Image: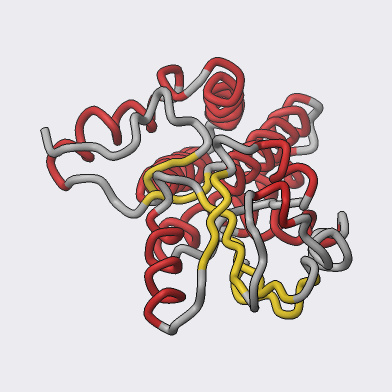
């Protein structure tokens, strides 16, 4: 087995970015199959499977197990990303599939099939292109909660151990996040003085500053005033 940087069953704040796409391909294909063979109980089974993974962990998610135990050892670990957006997408998928099952059980088959096909279409789109509607909903919700609007207008430099002198870049990161490492190197190559805040070690700062996903990087001047949002 090729070396992993993130344990899929313990490092739950991050995930191999290929794993959600494998899960989406599985869910989307089976949701489409349910429509083609006209067997709606499969929607209920898929919803229950998503809920089991969300509540009890990735070991209870059969597509997750298939990816981490069969696919990842052969092809290696993909880029590591924040696990919150795909987790929210799974919650949305479980809800819509559950609703489809309820409508079918109530005899409203047209609505039930429409919801099932919606899940199939969005899941297969995400699997094939990386455009995850549920993930984008999570990010939009974060913005609507004010993360971009006001929660990062100032950073208390003493909290991150900075004796400020000149402009710096504060980057919120996670040690296993591939995009975080890439962004940090790019910022340093551009000549920025970068101070990183590890959200896995400082979750209270992630909550305080409304960090919905990592990486996030902001330029900070003066006494902690945020001048520019560079990433995230």
222 vs 25: above or below: below
Q: Is residue 199 left or right of residue 139?
A: left
Along the line of sight, which residue is nearer the eye, 155 or 183? 155
Residue found at x 51% / y 42% = 31
Q: Position of residue 51 (x, y in %)?
A: 61, 24
Along the line of sight, which residue is nearer the eye, 220 or 7? 220
Residue 45 visible: yes
22 vs 63: above or below: below
> According to the image, what is the colour scheme of the structure?
secondary structure
119 vs 223: above or below: above
Residue 121 visible: no
Along the line of sight, which residue is nearer the eye, 217 or 95? 217
Residue found at x 12% / y 41% = 74
Q: Position of residue 117 (x, y in %)?
A: 60, 51
Q: How many marks?
A: 0
Res 185 quadrant in image: bottom left
Q: Quadrant of the C terminus?
A: bottom right
Q: Position of residue 80 (x, y in %)?
A: 39, 49
Residue found at x 65% / y 50% = 160
Q: Residue furthest bottom?
A: 190
Residue found at x 76% / y 42% = 207
Q: Quadrant of the N terminus?
A: top left
Q: Is residue 209 left or right of residue 180?
A: right
Q: Position of residue 188 (x, y in %)?
A: 42, 74
Q: Is residue 196 left or right of residue 165?
A: left
């Amino acid at each position: 087995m090729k070396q992993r940087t993130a344990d899929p069953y313990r490092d739950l704040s991050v995930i191999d970015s290929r794993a959600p796409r494998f899960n989406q391909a599985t869910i989307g294909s089976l949701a489409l199959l349910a429509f083609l063979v006209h067997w709606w109980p499969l929607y209920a089974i898929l919803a229950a499977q998503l809920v089991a993974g969300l509540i009890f962990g990735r070991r209870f998610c059969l597509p997750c197990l298939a990816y981490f135990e069969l696919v990842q050892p052969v092809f290696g670990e993909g880029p590591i990303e924040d696990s919150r957006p795909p987790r929210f997408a799974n919650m949305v998928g479980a809800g819509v599939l559950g609703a489809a099952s309820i409508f079918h059980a109530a005899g409203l088959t047209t609505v039930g099939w429409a919801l099932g096909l919606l899940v199939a279409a969005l899941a297969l789109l995400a699997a094939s292109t990386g455009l995850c509607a549920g993930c984008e909903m999570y990010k939009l919700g974060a913005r609507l909660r004010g993360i971009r609007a006001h929660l990062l207008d100032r950073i208390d430099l003493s909290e991150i151990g900075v004796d400020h002198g000149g402009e710096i870049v504060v980057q919120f990161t996670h040690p296993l996040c591939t995009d975080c490492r890439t962004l940090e190197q790019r910022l340093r190559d551009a000549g920025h003085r970068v101070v990183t805040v590890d959200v896995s070690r400082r979750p209270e700062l992630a909550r305080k500053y409304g960090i919905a996903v990592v990486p996030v990087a902001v330029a900070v001047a003066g006494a902690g005033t945020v001048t520019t949002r560079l990433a995230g």
